[in-house]
Image: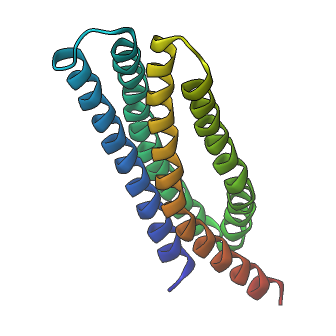
């Protein structure tokens, strides 16, 4: 597989991440609807409803933006590749090296939000805040899972770029 095909495979996988963000958002919106129309009115239900509504809308917007971003990455990469293959490989290698190295940091931040939400759920007495914390925990747990599945495409593309850098350096 040439490096341009690798870029396409990577951006396609990352667009799928964006679609999964949108699906997660829809699930959160459905959850908000269920709590708005089918669950008795309580502070905890209100917190879960509003927390799910806000996080659902945010991740749907984030999923659309992320999909568009990856389309832009692919188009700009193809243009740079046609202009100068060596420059393309170096640019993409530097960019993907940062993405690969920061992956664990993002996962740890998402896990910290899940943990903080669980602490709120277990130790805070305010029912509305507990409801919001449930929604935030669902949101960040979904992000952890979705991003976890995206890591193989990040690693694969980064490794292919490293191999191309070594070929160029010879």
Question: Looking at the image, which residue sits at the far left?
Answer: 38
Q: Quadrant of residue 120?
A: top right
Q: Residue at x 61, y 42 (%)?
A: 110
Spot occupied by residue 96 in the image (x, y as percentages of width and height): 68, 61
Could you say which is closer to the camera, residue 161 or residue 100? 100
Instruction: Identify the image quadrant of residue 34.
Output: top left
Reply above or below: 116 against 153.
Answer: above
Residue visible at 39% across and 15% down?
Answer: 44
Provide residue 92's location: percent of width, then percent of height. 67, 63
Which quadrant, please, contains the C terminus?
Answer: bottom right
| Apparent side of residue 113 relative to residue 32 in the rendered image (left or right) | right
Q: In this rendered view, identify the residue nearer to me: 131 or 21.
A: 131
Q: 116 above or below 102?
A: above
Residue at (54% x, 59% y) in the render: 148
User: In the drawing, does residue 98 fall left or right of residue 12?
Assistant: right
Residue 84 horizontal/vertical position (percent): 65, 68
In the displayed orientation, state which residue is furthest to the bottom: 170
């Amino acid at each position: 597989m040439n490096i341009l095909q690798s870029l396409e495979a990577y951006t396609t996988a990352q667009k799928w991440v964006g679609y999964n963000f949108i699906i997660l958002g829809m699930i959160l919106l459905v959850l908000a609807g269920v709590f708005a129309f089918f669950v008795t009115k309580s502070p905890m239900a209100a917190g879960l409803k509003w927390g799910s509504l806000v996080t659902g809308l945010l991740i749907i917007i984030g999923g659309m933006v992320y999909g568009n971003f990856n389309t832009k990455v692919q188009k700009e990469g193809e243009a740079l590749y046609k202009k100068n293959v060596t420059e393309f490989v170096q640019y993409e290698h530097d960019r993907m090296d940062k993405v690969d190295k920061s992956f664990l940091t993002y996962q740890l931040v998402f896990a910290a939000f899940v943990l903080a939400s669980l602490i709120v759920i277990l130790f805070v007495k305010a029912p509305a805040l507990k409801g919001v914390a449930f929604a935030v925990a669902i949101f960040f747990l979904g992000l952890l899972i979705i991003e976890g599945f995206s890591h193989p495409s990040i690693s694969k593309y980064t490794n292919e770029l490293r191999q191309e850098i070594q070929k160029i350096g010879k």
